[in-house]
Amino acid sequence: MRPILKRLGTLAIAAGLSHCAEQLPQTSADGIFTAAQADRGAALFGQHCARCHSIQEFTGPAFNAVWAGTPASAMYLRIANTMPMDQPGSLGTGQTTALLAHILDSNGMPSGNQPLPGDLPWLTGIQMATAD
Ligand code: HEC
């Protein structure tokens, strides 16, 4: 291969990689859930959580004190494995991700085009952002 072509090829690969890195979400403020998921989560919160909790326990200063800076998987697992307190483990993946979406939405974090997945390694790579 002529040196100039080889060089162009390397540049194209580097450009492709950096473009890809820019698109990967890194925090809960990067549009990691859909608006539909948050809506579903709001209804689920009313059905399964509101008898013991108000959303204020998971938003604003309370959210920042406990969850900001932790991996998103920490809250996912807390809900999936321990809540509702009288029926732990009863929520499915879709319900747990919807509840998490509702909590992020209630903290003013933006929705995006991709639904929040219940994929633990992926969630571990997402850091909870600070709420407004
Ligand atoms: C029967 C009452 C009850 C229900 C229903 C319930 N919880 Fe809880 N939840 C609690 C109690 C009590 C605690 C505190 C327990 C502790 O500190 O170990 C708690 C703690 C939590 C925490 C950790 C809070 C923190 O700041 O550390 C989260 C998150 C949570 N609940 C989410 C939920 C969600 C989401 C639902 C609905 C699916 C739910 N809970 C339903 C009683 C309940």
Image: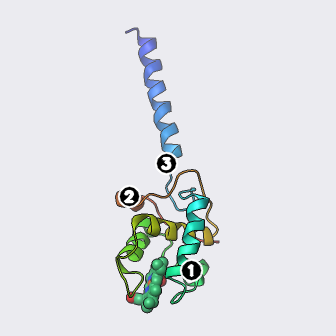
Marks 1 and 3: CB-CB under 8 Å?
Answer: no
Q: Residue 110: which disc?
A: none
Q: Give the label, 1 or 3, closer to the camera.
A: 1
Q: Which residue is at a point 53% across and 62% down the rendered structure image?
A: 28
Mark 3 Cα-neighbour bin, 10 Å: few <14, some 14–19, many ≥20: few
Asked if one can make out residue 66 in the rendered structure from this viewpoint, the answer is no
Amino acid type assigned to the residue bearing label 3 in the image: Leu
Percent coordinates x, y for residue 41 in the rendering: 54, 70
Rounded to the nearest angstrom, the CA distance separating label 3 from label 2 is: 15 Å
Q: Earlier in the sequence, mark 1 or mark 2?
A: 1
Which of the image's four quarters has the C terminus?
Answer: bottom right
**Residue behind mark 1:** 46
Marks 3 and 2: CB-CB under 8 Å?
Answer: no
Percent coordinates x, y for residue 48 in the rendering: 49, 81
Quarter location, residue 73:
bottom left
**Residue behind mark 2:** 119
Quarter location, residue 118:
bottom left
Q: Earlier in the sequence, mark 3 or mark 2?
A: 3
Q: Considering depth in this image, is 51 or 14 the residue closer to the camera?
A: 51
**Residue behind mark 3:** 24
Asked if one can make out residue 53 in the rendered structure from this viewpoint, the answer is yes
Quarter location, residue 64:
bottom right
Q: Considering depth in this image, is 89 or 31 the residue closer to the camera?
A: 89
